[in-house]
Image (spheres, coloured by chain):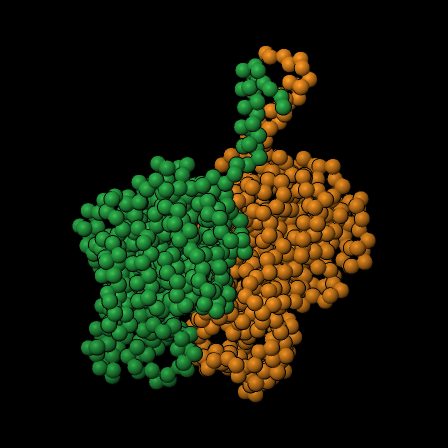
Chain colours: A orange, B green
């Protein structure tokens, strides 16, 4: 071996070694802090509609306001099909993201025979001392969050899932509540009580939430205000003073950042999906913008921990078959037409449609009775609709009131209204059409989603790959050796 | 300065310099051979439907067969809005790709005032000795190909465009024909004759085309078989013996490859768009697969010239608001249901609907008369449609026959049929619905498209960027200094 006695030669050799290592490409650097943001039901149409809307609110020129996360240095495309259908649900998609395995619709972290369990990315890292947080706008026992801490043959086993939450030992749960905290028949031990027995600090109001400080131990934070299905309110319905997804994200960072082994934080914007199921673009867009604000909390943290942090933002599937264009508006879009919308389809249904239905005799019901509320809350004048659109709205109204002279066949009822209150879903669907936004479904669709990454290992998330690859790439960045496929 | 006398030290210093240069990142290497493939109307839904269909034809398991070009190492996302509308047309999109400038719908390579001309990537490279080829399945004077050799305030100026073709001096034009070769009123000098006078060899049959060899000089090759609007036939209608887009691509390579300065070849799959305007998924998919085969000709060439070649594949916009999922089929897709389709909507219209319309008295017309042809050519049994779908088909049929008892308002006629023969468009639209494919428009939509790249400079095409950036990145890879914005 050559021995280098001259200090100059030694420095030269050292420099050469360093430079050569850089040129060869470093071994995968590991990230200490990893964020996985999942926009449920968020594919390019959902992202793009938010970017167009955001621009349309601030400028008359044609352009887009890029969201924070779409400005990340890396963008990729991700397929979402599962083991049984080209169109995934959130359970099989969550399983793919959390474990790298395809399974059937409805199954969480188990194989297609519903017998074998899969190990999750959160389990892998938690056993190595990494703290784990789970945040969502929907109930904590819903499919996407559950995929990061539970295993069950059916996503509908809400109680079983909520019991697994308490047993997970993960450090932070925040957002929505529980669908069946005492079981389907309300006769089981309360899941929140079980979590407290397992050492969780449970908070349910803003003051207690804000008072949480590092060292608080394991935390289960359920939003005080809950809307449909124990979820946090749609962003469009959220009172300014209420906690937001960004608040829950920031608190998770605050509570876990001092851990010497770092953390893994999954944050779901869960109601982008719900808004799209109901073909309500304004609510989808406002939830997407709120989701982006949650991501920006991670970005702020990453600015201080740039060499140790990875942020990945993806969607689990598209929802609603949303399109940025519609037959009736041809080559034009009018996004400003959805700006006056003041409430979600859900709140309109709860506060306007249901009370009207209860208070009005079938034979006295007139669509015109609802016209002022539609104008007030959606900025939509019924006279501005085309004759065909007016007829569709009238038919939906009559169906809601039980007056359908020709009851559509079961298959067509779903095709027309997707299981929603007919008049409710038609109001946003038709308003969206006037804005140049089309919908083809009340379910998910199979178009690939977009994935964005920033930070340590970001380059792994470029290209066109499957959702199961996200698990593998996250594992690689976190230094987890996973079984090869 | 340090002088190195020892040979060992000199070698070490040389190695250090080389390695350091690699580590610093090389100056942009230039590509000698550049391919730009444009799938007109091809965004992720069009790509993804082809990948799902391709798999469904060969396997019962749920997965996709990746197209050749989606396996390229780099994938990006590209916005397409133009200067006047969030939804671009092919003229403003072509202008963006060819010159890096936004303009209005309908304008080719001129600014929004329609007075200032833009310089195209093809002009930049041609004046430096690079050979230029333009290939398309649609007419050569159509907006996308025209954007690479012509400038005009209106894409409808077909004659002007075709005259500019002859004056371009570009080396190779191949594919469809001309819409107005003798002008709008058939009273102008024939554009093909003008091209011949300008030195072009004109070929119009397969044998002469195949006989073309390097050294042939400038070539204008128009396909012998033309379908609607002087385009090559839809792939689904193409006779096996007829020339394909891949044939025109391969010939372009063959004719231009020996040029010491290399070539730039633009290849458009133009009828993916037309099929999507008409909501005909099977025809869109078969044209997308044919487009992929054309790309594979470039890939074969690149394998022999890896260090000198760049292949970029993009779309100019989405078309039809295609979704991989539909309300009526919920979480299922049945792509095999479009496999039996034997002809495009266009051929069905030309060969079945029009003759029936001519031969049948209004009051004798019955949808049932067309049922056998629909079953034979689309594999669709009308009884398998839902009552609502059957009613839509019946209404479209009556409208086609002029029997509509209630003529829809102008705006709703477009909403329902998009300017197409009503029965023709409803057949494929409804067949697609049974397969789980939805459509929201007969026009383009604004969702970003996907861009794929392979070869020299491929890394420039990663990320999420605007279609005007494609021009700038191509220019960079071809060593063209363009005016900064």
In percent of the image, x 22 and y 74: which residue is there?
Answer: B356
Q: Is residue A332 visible?
A: yes
Return the x and y of residue B466 as percentages of the image width and height: 51, 56
Return the x and y of residue B410 as percentages of the image width and height: 41, 80
Examine the rendered structure and indicate whether residue B359 appears above or below residue A121.
Answer: below
Examine the rendered structure and indicate whether residue B227 appears above or below residue A381.
Answer: above
Horizontally, residue B212 falls left or right of residue B303, namely left
In percent of the image, x 67 and y 36: which residue is there?
Answer: A127
Examine the rendered structure and indicate whether residue A80 appears above or below residue B104.
Answer: above
- Number of numbered discs present? 0
Examine the rendered structure and indicate whether residue A127 appears above or below residue B198.
Answer: above
In front: B454, or A132? Answer: B454
Q: Is residue A145 visible?
A: no
Q: What residue occupies the far bottom of the structure in this picture?
A: A364
Quadrant location of residue B199?
bottom left
Return the x and y of residue A280 as percentages of the image width and height: 56, 68
Quadrant location, the N terminus of chain B: top right
Q: What residue occupies the far left of the structure in this picture?
A: B207
In percent of the image, x 23 and y 57: which residue is there?
Answer: B196
Quadrant location of residue B337?
bottom left
In percent of the image, x 36 and y 57: which residue is there?
Answer: B149
Return the x and y of residue B465 as percentages of the image width and height: 53, 53
Horizontally, residue A160 falls left or right of residue B453, namely right
Quadrant location, the C terminus of chain B: bottom right
Horizontally, residue B334 falls left or right of residue A473, namely left
């Amino acid at each position: 071996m050559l021995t280098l006695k001259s200090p100059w030669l030694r420095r030269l050799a050292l420099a050469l070694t360093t430079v050569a290592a850089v040129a060869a490409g470093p071994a995968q650097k590991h990230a200490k802090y990893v964020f996985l943001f999942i926009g449920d039901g968020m594919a390019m149409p959902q992202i793009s509609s938010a970017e167009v809307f955001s621009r349309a609110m601030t400028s008359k020129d044609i352009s887009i306001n890029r969201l924070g996360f779409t400005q990340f240095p890396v963008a990729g495309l991700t397929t979402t099909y599962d083991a049984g259908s080209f169109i995934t649900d959130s359970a099989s998609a969550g399983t793919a993201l959390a474990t790298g395995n395809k399974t059937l619709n409805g199954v969480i972290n188990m194989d297609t025979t519903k017998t074998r369990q899969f190990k999750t990315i959160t389990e892998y890292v938690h056993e190595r001392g990494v703290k784990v947080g789970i945040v969502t706008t929907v109930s904590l026992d819903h499919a996407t969050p559950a995929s990061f801490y539970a295993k069950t043959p059916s996503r509908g086993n809400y109680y079983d899932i909520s019991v697994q939450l308490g047993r997970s030992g993960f450090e932070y749960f925040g957002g929505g509540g529980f669908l069946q905290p005492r079981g389907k028949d309300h006769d089981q031990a309360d899941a929140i009580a079980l979590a407290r027995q397992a050492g969780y600090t449970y908070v349910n109001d803003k003051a207690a939430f804000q008072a949480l400080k590092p060292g608080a131990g394991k935390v289960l934070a359920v939003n005080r205000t809950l809307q449909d299905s124990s979820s946090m309110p749609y962003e469009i319905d959220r009172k300014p003073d209420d906690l937001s997804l960004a608040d829950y994200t920031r608190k998770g960072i605050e509570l876990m950042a001092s851990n010497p082994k770092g953390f893994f934080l999954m944050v779901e914007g869960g109601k982008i999906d719900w808004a799209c199921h109901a073909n309500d673009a304004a609510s989808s867009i406002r939830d997407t913008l709120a989701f982006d604000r949650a991501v920006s909390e991670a970005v702020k943290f990453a600015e201080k921990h740039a060499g140790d942090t990875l942020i990945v933002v993806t969607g689990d599937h598209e929802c609603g078959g949303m399109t940025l264009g519609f037959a009736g508006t041809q080559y034009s879009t009018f996004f400003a037409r959805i700006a006056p919308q003041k409430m979600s389809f859900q709140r309109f249904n709860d506060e306007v449609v249901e009370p009207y239905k209860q208070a009005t005799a079938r034979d006295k019901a007139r669509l015109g009775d609802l016209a002022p509320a539609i104008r007030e809350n959606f900025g939509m004048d019924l006279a501005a609709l085309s004759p065909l659109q007016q007829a569709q709205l009238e038919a939906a109204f009559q169906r809601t009131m039980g007056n359908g002279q020709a009851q559509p066949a079961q298959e067509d009822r779903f095709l027309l209204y997707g299981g929603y209150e007919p008049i409710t879903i038609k109001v946003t669907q038709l308003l969206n059409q006037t804005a140049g936004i089309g919908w083809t479904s009340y379910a998910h669709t199979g178009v690939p989603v977009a994935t964005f990454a920033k930070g340590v290992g970001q380059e792994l998330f470029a290209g066109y790959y499957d959702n199961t690859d996200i698990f593998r790439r996250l594992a690689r960045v976190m230094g987890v050796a996973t079984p090869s496929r």
